[in-house]
Amino acid sequence: MSADPHQARAALLSAFAQTGRNHPYLAFTLNSLCNRDCTFCKPRCVADYGHKDRPLTAPDYAAIAEEAGAWGVRKAHCSGGEPTLRGDILDVVAALAKGLGESAAIGITSHGNLRRGLSVEALHQAGLTYLNVSLHSLDPARSAEIMGGGDSNETLATIDAALALEMKVKVNCVLQRSYLEDAFGVAELARQRPVAVRLIELQRIGPAEAFFPQEFVTEQEVRGHLQTWFERAGEIPRSELGVRSPGRYLQPAGWAGSIGFISNSSCATCSDANRIKVTPTGIARPCILHNRDIELKPHLADGTLTDAFAHLFRSIVERDGNEAWQGFHYVDYDLRWDRVERPKGVPVLPLLPSASTAGAGCSLRRTLGEDQ
């Protein structure tokens, strides 16, 4: 930053605004720990599962949020692992809400089986404004089969509790061929409930690599199955749903909610991705594969978070001039945590899809940020 940090901040924010992209938001991975074992995730299969989790504290999150607020950031999303397993989750939510200010959107992605002593009401009182819930089948036995445990009825109760508090609710359902009818059942929750169900294409990452050829189902195929739902569907504005990234959410005629798609396998475009990803130990990533990481803990200790955010915004602004970035990538799921050592100060080359698959059959632009 220059001698006048306010002037330098204003210049960077002006440069970002000129790109026309959505303003960045904070995407915190609070932990890698999870008490489920989803077939396509299985974090406990990693040899050092949980070993590197020396997480930021609630005061750390408060300081980061306060600085982010000075840069115009008004949204923070928390994921994991299962973020609600953190004993200080209410303190973390409250810290983010206070730091970003009264109008901020604060959300969590959870499997919805909250630990004893924690409730949706308590999270809401702490400052949570919306909830993303992972649910892959309404049948308790089949849900437990996919997720390695848990109770889908309890997840539904969590959804209904959030709706009763007038919170925005999104339901994430991963598409697998063996459980396709289950996914359609989850999608039908939007018939009676004002939720946004997102049907998510399976990705060829982590444990899903082994069964991807057999289980992968494209958005295009699913749209064919659900054609009658979409014939007279209206479109829900993203702003109304709290979704900041490209994509369309369709509301079938007479339904209370909507259905959208996250299709990073058949259409892996991230041309408007706007997440600033922060790992449990405080490593910030302005673009998940193509820009320079920065460790926030030294800046927290030195009181120089303004310099850290200048780095982050500059990296995002300069992304379009980075030869490594060409608008496509796939996600290595270990990058959500701290498991992959990444070069510091140099671009990371992308893993590009072939020309034949990049965007083939895609009806919409997508972004990696759409999972929030």
Image (cartoon, rainbow, N blue to C red):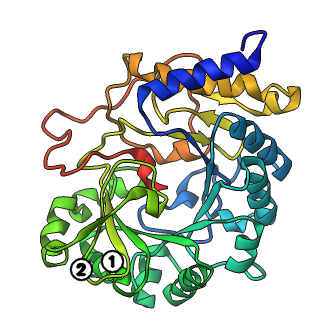
Residue 303 in the image: x percent, y percent?
Answer: 86, 28
Q: Specify the quadrant that holds the N terminus.
A: top right
Residue 52 in the image: x percent, y percent?
Answer: 70, 45
148 and 30: which is toward the camera? 30
Identify the residue at horizontal 45%, vertical 50% (top origin). Answer: 244
* Of the two numbered discs 2 and 1 in the rendering, the one whose residue sits closer to the viewer: 2
Identify the residue at horizontal 48%, vertical 48% (top origin). Answer: 333
The residue beneath circle 2 is 253
As drawn, 55 above or below 185: above
As drawn, 22 above or below 215: above
Identify the residue at horizontal 78%, vertical 60% (top origin). Answer: 94
The residue beneath circle 1 is 187
54 and 138: which is toward the camera? 138
- The quadrant holding residue 121 is bottom right
The span from disc 2 to disc 1 (Cα, nearest Å) is 14 Å
Secondary structure beneath dot 2 equals loop
The three-letter code of the residue at mark 1 reads: Ala
Residue 361 in the image: x percent, y percent?
Answer: 13, 49
Pointer 2 or 1: first along the chain:
1
* Callout 1 crowding tier (Cα within 10 Å): few <14, some 14–19, many ≥20: many
Asked whether, in this view, residue 72 is left or right of residue 21, the answer is: right
As drawn, 36 above or below 353: below
Residue 313 in the image: x percent, y percent?
Answer: 58, 26
Asked whether, in this view, residue 79 is left or right of residue 232, the answer is: right
Secondary structure beneath dot 1 equals helix
The three-letter code of the residue at mark 2 reads: Ala
Q: Is residue 292 visible?
A: no
